[in-house]
Amino acid sequence: MRSATLDVPTLETLVSAAVAAPSIHNTQPWRFRLDPDTVTLEIRAAADRGLRHTDPTGRALHLSVGCALLNLRVAVAHFGWEPVTRLLPRPDQPDLLATVRLGGPARTSSPACLYDALWRRHSSRFPFSERPLPAPVLTELAEAAHAEGALLGRPSPGETDRLLRITREAERRNTADPDRAAESRRRVHEPNHEALGMPPATLGPQDFREQIPMRDFGAHRHPAVLAARPFEKRPTIAVLSTAHDRRTDWLRAGQALERVLLVATANGIRSSLLHQALEWPDLREQLVPQPSDRRGHAQMVIRLGYGPEGPASPRRAARQVLVDGTPSIPG
């Protein structure tokens, strides 16, 4: 186990692990700062990287930061420290979303498979096979969400069809809304050091049956431009939800989402996120069970399956997201 002294290479590895997390439209809306006196890493919202039209409340931004927070916790434990986490620790600083203090020796070791998976995990927007997910793996995914205070529901085939219909309606609205469509188009870039949005190669084809509504980041849906392929007839869909819908719940949901995605990756399962319906309040309400069973608040719709890995979206380097650069740390 490493000593309590945090050196610069380890700091950069911890931040790089956090930055490997998914974020809406690959906006990477976070900044990190180290308090060397308490050996505490702060995660702050980068409001300038938010999506004003797609995410006006900042819910998806909080989920994104929650994903990064989970990765940071896994990495801190991997290096032998206990990650002491606080959410929204200073009400007078609303942009400070979480802190992770490097405590004493880790009480429980972080599973090595999760640390390995966080470097390999990325969304795959390509067709998956019809091979069903084993029941023990589905149980493990549900337990991963529960460990972070969230619920991972597995809808029935009929309920899955209903959720996909709602998502298709949301995608239709997004494409038709000029502000949201323009915001989405601005996130599509060839990889370079300045624009780290969605490289075209990562977007994948559209489902020619239009059963699975893959997001059209270009907002054009023109067959001469947008490739179409058959996707799985019976997709495996899961809905992540929380009992409440406060900022802390959004951060917890992000941690639960990332733990689910890491466990899926460790089991060789690909994933993509169907976020469209969550961007419209009236449609988001319909993602939870029908009124007689209504409980909780939907936070993410996840598509899971076996299929191609697909290319990864670029990430910003640790030094780009550390406030004031990497500090000079003694020892």
Image (cartoon, grey):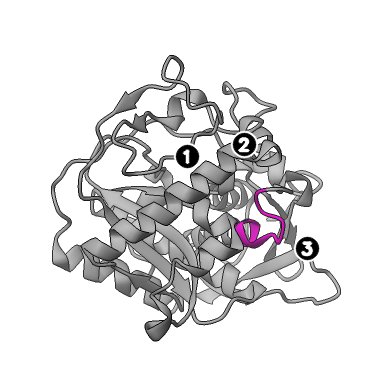
Q: Is label 2 in a helix, a strand or a loop?
A: helix
- Residue 18 in view of the camera: yes
* Mark 1 crowdedness (10 Å alpha carbons): few <14, some 14-19, many ≥20: many
Between label 3 and label 2, give the one nearer the viewer: 2
Could you tell which of marks 3 and 2 lies nearer the N-terminus?
A: 3
Q: Residue furthest top?
A: 224
Residue 273 within the segment the image draws in magenta = no
Residue 61 within the segment the image draws in magenta = yes
Marker disc for residue 184: 2
Give coordinates of residue 49: x percent, y percent.
72, 45
Quick one: 144 or 249, which is closer to the camera? 249
Is the C-beta separation of discs 3 and 2 under 8 Å? no
Q: Distance between the residues labelled 1 and 3?
A: 29 Å
**Which quadrant of the rendered structure holds the N terminus?**
bottom left
Q: Within the image, what quadrant is residue 37 found in?
A: bottom right
Residue 281 shown left or right of residue 238 in the figure = right
Quick one: 315 or 133, which is closer to the camera? 133
Give coordinates of residue 210: x percent, y percent.
34, 38
What segment is highlighted magenta in the picture?
A: 54-62
Mark 3 residue type: Asp
Marker disc for residue 95: 3
